[in-house]
Image (spheres, grey):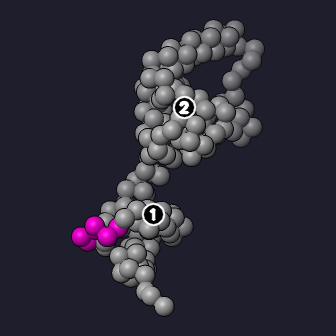
Amino acid sequence: MSCPPKSKNSWLAHYRELVGAWTRRVGNSHDAEDATHDAILRVLETDSGALVNPRAYLHRSVQNRLIDSHRQSKVLDLVPLHELDEGDHPLLTDPDAAARTTQLLVSLKAGLAELPLKCRQVFLWHRLEGFTQEEIAQKLGISVNMVEKYMIRAVRHLRDRMQNHAPH
């Protein structure tokens, strides 16, 4: 029976260290484990034989994954309508509500129109149609990484474009 290449198993030597170090840093073992698993999966899916320092690569990958998830949680802080306090609900009887809704819709349409076609398609398919990033990548014939980049670009653009509609 042959042994798998050392580069494919080198992650195993660093697993406990990664989870322990990042659990101490972020204070949450679940997030540290998820980020470590994602980093290790990325190493296993790619040709990791070219890695000069697998330990450093894995630490950096885990750090980047944790930063990304932190940023995403800050950008996408959503609260369901039924969980809002009474005073935070949009008032349907407010005379300005229809005008504000119309302005918001016009700004959203304009912001979407400013995006490149593939970027707009990715955003709409993912957010409105519910397609996964993998499904979108297959439909457009691009990589999942490119789909992620399009989503990030679209969200950033729309967030900047819609900034004046945010409550103050």
Q: Nearer the viewer, residue 119 or 21?
A: 119
Give how far across and how far down residue 162 sits, in percent. 49, 22
Q: Is residue 7 left or right of residue 36?
A: left
* 1 or 2: mark nearer the eye: 1
Front in this rendered view, residue 90 or 46: 46
Q: Can you say whether 77 is above or below 32 in the image? A: above
Percent across and percent down for residue 97 are 67, 13
Is residue 101 in sight in this rendering?
A: yes
Report the Cα–Cα distance between label 1 and label 2. 26 Å
Find the magenta span and give its range: 48-53
Q: For mark 1, give the secondary structure.
A: helix
Instruction: Give the residue displayed 37% in from the left and 56% down from the top.
Output: 64
Amino acid type of the residue that numbered disc 1 sits on in the rendered structure: Glu
Residue 45 marker: 1
List x then y, in percent, for residue 14: 38, 78
Determine whether 103 is above or below 168 in the image.
above
Establish if 160 lies above or below 55.
above
Whether residue 10 is visible, yes or no, is no
Residue found at x 44% / y 41%: 146
The amino acid type found where label 2 is placed reads Phe
Please tell me which residue lies in front, 44 or 124: 44
Residue visible at 50% across and 16% down? 113
Q: Which mark is residue 123?
A: 2
Q: Position of residue 75 (x, y in %)?
A: 49, 40
Magenta span contains residue 52: yes
Earlier along the polypeptide chain: callout 1 or callout 2? Answer: 1
